Amino acid sequence: MSDEKSNPGGPDLAMGIQLSGLADGSMLLGHVQGEPVLLARHGGELFAIGAVCTHYGAPLEQGLLIEDTVRCPWHHACFSVRTGEALRAPALDPVSCWRVEQRNGTVYVREKIERAQPAPLQGAAPKSIVIVGGGAAGNAAAETLRREGYAGRITLLSADDSPPCDRPNLSKGYLAGTVPETSNPLRTAEFYAHHEIELQLSTRVVSIDTASRHVQLAHGDRVGYDALLLATGAEPVHLVLPGSDLPHVHYLRTLADSRALVAQAIGSKRAVVLGASFIGLEVASSLRARNIEVQVVAPERCPMEKILGAQLGAFIRTLHEQHGVRFHLGTTATRIDERRVTLANADTLEADLVVIGVGVRPATLLAQEAGLTLDRGVAVNEYLQTNVPDVFAAGDIARWPDRLTGERIRVEHWVVAERQGQTAARNMLGQRERFEAIPFFWTEQYDFGLAYIGHAEHWDKIEIEGSLDQRDCTVTYRQGNRKLAVAVIHRDLEGLRAEVELERAAAARLPADPSRR
């Protein structure tokens, strides 16, 4: 999380600026009493909010003003310029607001406005809500329920022994040793207590009875609900081969996994990463930051080709090779022992640390046994509702109707899971909000950053505008004449514009819903 205080730039907005210097639809970075403040003008109205994104501290003046919202340039969080509220994850906290005064053609930013408490929820609402899963979707749902004014009981059941954490950080900064463990928890224990969210850790749900509306816990207790959110996430695919259960062999999903991997890395010199997925390659990058020799083994001929295409995949391979990583592609591991990994092509690789990152699969067993409809995940409608009316699903397990492609999709990305948790929470309260967010994810490897907007399982054309070698380009994925996804490399504003363009294209395909608020 970020502190809004930083080294402020721009004019002192308390002293005033000329209104003529701020065009409609534009933003200006300034400061008030040492705090960076963003002054925005929209449709004749003026707003002043905190200028630093509360997620990772991005400068909001480099983002995009869309009507009365501003979008973060780094990870596409969205804030209301009217209230400062964080409208879309990954930001969970609001930014501050200041009163704006206009007099004789001069605009002044005055005192900070005290934030109003959520208004009590009007109308019928469930008396108790149970959330199964303490990951991105589950945590976002619990927070959103309280932000919407819900006063009923919220029980957040997590099989993990750690509170909800910043999972993307586990394979990036934390594993690389560049950020402390204190950066991992999304919230403190005091936060959950203050908001009366009953967070139960190390608590495994073994069954769901949708008829009597209760969940059965492994230790024998039952918890009743009026509405249920299933957010069980995904589980790493485990390789079954000799030696895969040795102590120096690791998977990475939870905070405990990352802690164990960090502890092993401290005394390691040579690592083998099995799998060239985003997780595998981020792990490779982080281990190189610790000066550990890294070799990557994967069955494909080009890393990330299936998702990003051959040209971008080849670029990423070269990037890693420039940092000393060696690739063994077109083969797999057949055996692991205490000091080496044996490959199907008979090569042997020295290793005192092995990380397996060959993908994940949705954790759908609870849903299946509860009689929920499955479709390579848990099938939900546009409101994230399952075939059982009072049961919703969100995150890595949810397969929903995507408005842009016209197909059902399931996406295993952090921001998507958080935003689905937020939408599911509002729908459990009866708001009938379609899940409309365009999928988004980002990866950071060494000094290279890539953001991906949209979802293209299949494409027949890739267009690269700019220079891939100079790390300044936009990559567009099309099927026929339809733009399905865009990847941007060090072009943050272009990524935001692509997101808005895809939203508008999807909205044009969306039938009207008279029941929507």
Image (tube, rainbow, N blue to C red):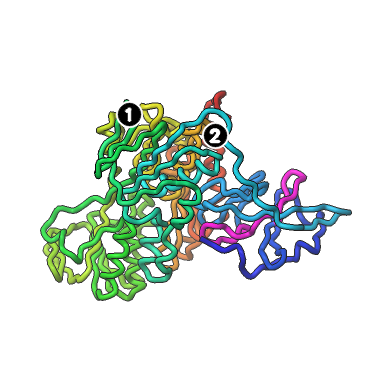
What is the quadrant of residue 369 in the picture?
top left
Residue closest to the eye, 268 or 26: 268
Q: Quick check: marks 2 and 1 in contact, CB under 8 Å?
A: no
Q: Determine which residue is flagged by label 2.
A: 507
Furthest toward the front, the residue is 221
Can you tell which mark lies on residue 506? none
Q: Position of residue 26 (x, y in %)?
A: 70, 52
Occupied quadrant, residue 212: top left
**Cα–Cα span, label 2 and label 1:** 34 Å
Span highlighted in magenta in the image: 39-62
32, above or below 513, in the image: below
Q: Residue at x 19, y 70 (%)?
A: 351
Q: Residue at x 63, y 70 (%)?
A: 7
Q: Number of marks in the image?
A: 2
Camera-nearest residue between 136 and 27: 136
Q: Nearer the viewer, mark 2 or mark 1?
A: 1
Compared across the picture, whether 496 is left or right of 415 comes to right
Left or right, 71 with respect to 354, comes to right
Residue in the picture at 33% in, 71% down:
288
Image quadrant occupied by the C terminus:
top right
Q: Amino acid at mark 2?
A: Ala
- Name, please, the residue furthest toward the top: 514
